[in-house]
């Protein structure tokens, strides 16, 4: 079964209760083919991996700066 769909990938960061910022990584203004959907999935996986790495680095830096153990951050 072959189908077309629109693809969009973004994250939204909430700074305060009423303030947020949307960062768009990928958006198709047209229906995407199967090849584009496959590329989209690969892009999503790559972005998630990079965001997880950023999270690890920030947590490590935070722990070092404030001399916290893993247990104290939980």
Image: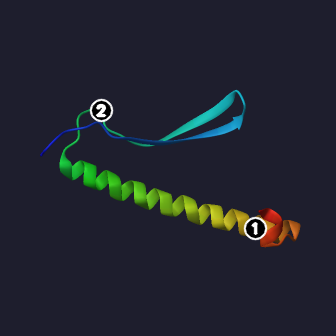
Q: Which image quadrant is residue 59 in? A: bottom right
Q: Are marks 1 and 2 in contact (CB under 8 Å)?
A: no
Task: Where is residue 28? Give x, y as percent.
Answer: 31, 37
Residue at x-position 81% and y-position 71%: 64
Disc 1, SS: helix
- Residue linked to disc 1: 61
- Residue linked to disc 2: 29
Residue at x-position 29% and y-position 55%: 39
Residue at x-position 68% and y-position 30%: 19
Relative placement, left or right, of 67 versus 51 is right
Task: Where is residue 33? Give x, y as percent.
Answer: 19, 44
How many numbered callouts? 2
Establish if 48 lies above or below 12.
below
Task: Where is residue 23? Give x, y as percent.
Answer: 52, 40
Establish if 52 lies above or below 33.
below
Relative placement, left or right, of 53 versus 43 is right
Q: Residues within 10 Å of mark 2 (few under 14, many from 20)?
A: few
Establish if 27 lies above or below 69.
above
Relative placement, left or right, of 62 versus 34 is right
The circle on residue 74 is: none
Outermost residue, left direction? 1
Q: Give how far apart the Cα atoms at labels 1 and 2 are.
A: 39 Å
Colour theme: rainbow
Disc 2, SS: loop
Task: Where is residue 45? Give x, y as percent.
Answer: 41, 59
Residue at x-position 87% and y-position 71%: 67
């Amino acid at each position: 079964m072959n189908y077309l769909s629109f693809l969009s990938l973004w994250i939204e960061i909430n700074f305060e209760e009423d303030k947020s910022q949307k960062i768009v990584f990928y958006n198709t203004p047209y229906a995407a083919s199967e090849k584009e959907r496959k590329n989209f999935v690969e892009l999503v996986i790559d972005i998630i991996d990079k965001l997880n790495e950023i999270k690890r680095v920030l947590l490590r830096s935070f722990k070092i700066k404030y001399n916290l153990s893993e247990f104290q951050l939980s």
